[in-house]
Image (spheres, helix red, strand yellow):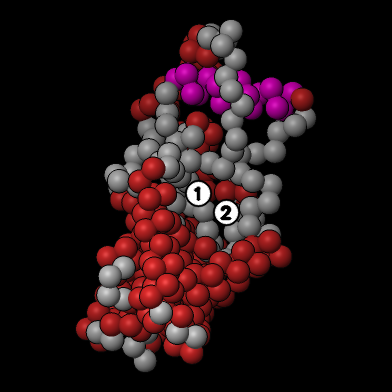
């Protein structure tokens, strides 16, 4: 009952997605025109390293919560990744035309090192069509040119990066090796970020039993899930199912943790306490996933 609001919200989301998945995607994806940086910050809260690192504040006194966290996240990862690999559903950018979707995260593409003998800025200036495209990219972030090329530049629009992306794509097309900017195996279903944030917040609800927090935490989890649609990488159905998986993993993980009380031992507590601490260390020392995001 304490996590009932989360279950209710994502159950309603599932029903809505089953009825109108694509229209709902278009409706929510339009929110990308409002403060893209806000949505990037919000969506990043669903990354497992970020979510788990927040549990560092519970290292001293909440060993049962951390033990539940370890079990629940493991269950969530197993189910989510199992479904992703088994179903291998394409993400929205792999299906929709460039003028139908806003994508505000860097594309999943491995860029080859640029050729030091090529002046990519001059390459753009030398052609009227590419020079005009660059002007449109600079002047209107929502132009078809910007929406097509900025993800191919890794989310950072400079003339040199435009030249590199244009040159590489042209070369791939000539060779017949172009596979688009998104992973051929997109693995869209279900949303791992949504499962992670829902799992984390459900655990907080179950362990602290604060009914007055329930709807606030549920809406926060839903907002992170919606952000996955807004940034253009998931369908509403992905988000709804991901949320339900995260909720179920937290409930089952909590049940298991109380029947296998390893955290009550001194050694068990110390080992389990390493989990959020390690996540926080990774977060502080790794190369940023999105350079524009503060602290992450």
The residue singled out by tag 1 in the image is 101
Query: Above or below — where is 81 with respect to 61?
Result: above
Neighbour class for label 2 at 10 Å: few (<14), some, many (≥20)? many
Q: Is residue 30 left or right of residue 97?
A: left
Neighbour class for label 1 at 10 Å: few (<14), some, many (≥20)? many
CB contact under 8 Å: marks 2 and 1: yes
Q: Position of residue 226 (x, y in %)?
A: 41, 63
Q: Is residue 43 visible?
A: no
The residue singled out by tag 2 in the image is 92
Assign the magenta stretch its main secondary structure.
Answer: helix
Query: Above or below — where is 99 with respect to 12?
Result: above
**Magenta-span inclusion, residue 164:** yes
Q: Residue 136's quadrant in the figure?
A: top left
- In magenta, the rendered stretch is 159-174
Of 124 and 201, the residue lying toward us = 201
Q: Is residue 270 left or right of residue 173?
A: left
Q: Position of residue 60 (x, y in %)?
A: 28, 70
Q: Residue at x 59, y 54 (%)?
A: 91
Q: Residue 289's quadrant in the figure?
A: top left
Residue reaching furthest front?
266
Q: Secondary structure at mark 1?
A: loop
Q: Residue at x 35, y 46 (%)?
A: 284
Residue reaching furthest left?
212
Of 78 and 1, the residue lying toward us = 78
Q: Position of residue 218 (x, y in %)?
A: 34, 76
Q: Secondary structure at mark 2?
A: helix
Q: Position of residue 282 (x, y in %)?
A: 42, 49
Of 263 and 224, the residue lying toward us = 263
Q: Residue at x 27, y 65 (%)?
A: 57
């Amino acid at each position: 009952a304490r996590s009932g609001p989360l279950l209710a919200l994502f159950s309603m989301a599932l029903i809505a997605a089953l009825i109108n998945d694509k229209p709902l995607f278009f409706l929510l994806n339009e929110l990308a025109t409002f403060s893209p940086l806000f949505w990037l910050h919000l969506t990043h809260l669903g990354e497992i390293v970020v979510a788990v690192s927040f549990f560092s504040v519970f290292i001293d006194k909440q060993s049962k919560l951390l033990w539940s966290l370890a079990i629940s996240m493991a269950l969530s990862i197993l189910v989510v990744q199992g479904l992703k690999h088994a179903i291998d559903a394409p993400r929205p950018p792999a299906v929709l035309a460039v003028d139908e979707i806003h994508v505000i995260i860097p594309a999943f593409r491995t860029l080859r090192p640029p050729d030091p003998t090529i002046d990519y800025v001059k390459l753009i200036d030398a052609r009227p069509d590419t020079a005009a495209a660059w002007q449109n990219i600079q002047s209107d972030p929502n132009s078809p040119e910007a929406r097509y090329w900025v993800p191919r530049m890794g989310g950072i629009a400079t003339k040199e990066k435009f030249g590199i992306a244009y040159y590489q794509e042209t070369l791939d097309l000539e060779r017949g090796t172009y596979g688009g900017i998104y992973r051929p195996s997109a693995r869209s279903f279900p949303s791992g970020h949504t499962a992670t944030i829902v799992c984390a917040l459900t655990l907080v609800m179950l362990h602290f039993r604060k009914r007055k927090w329930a709807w606030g935490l549920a809406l926060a989890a839903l907002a992170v899930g919606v952000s996955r649609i807004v940034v253009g990488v998931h369908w509403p159905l992905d988000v709804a199912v991901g949320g339900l998986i995260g909720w179920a993993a937290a409930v089952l993980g909590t049940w298991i943790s109380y029947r296998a009380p390893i955290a009550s031992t001194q050694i068990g507590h110390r080992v389990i306490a390493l989990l959020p601490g390690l996540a926080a260390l990774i977060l502080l020392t790794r190369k940023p996933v999105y350079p524009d995001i503060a602290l992450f």
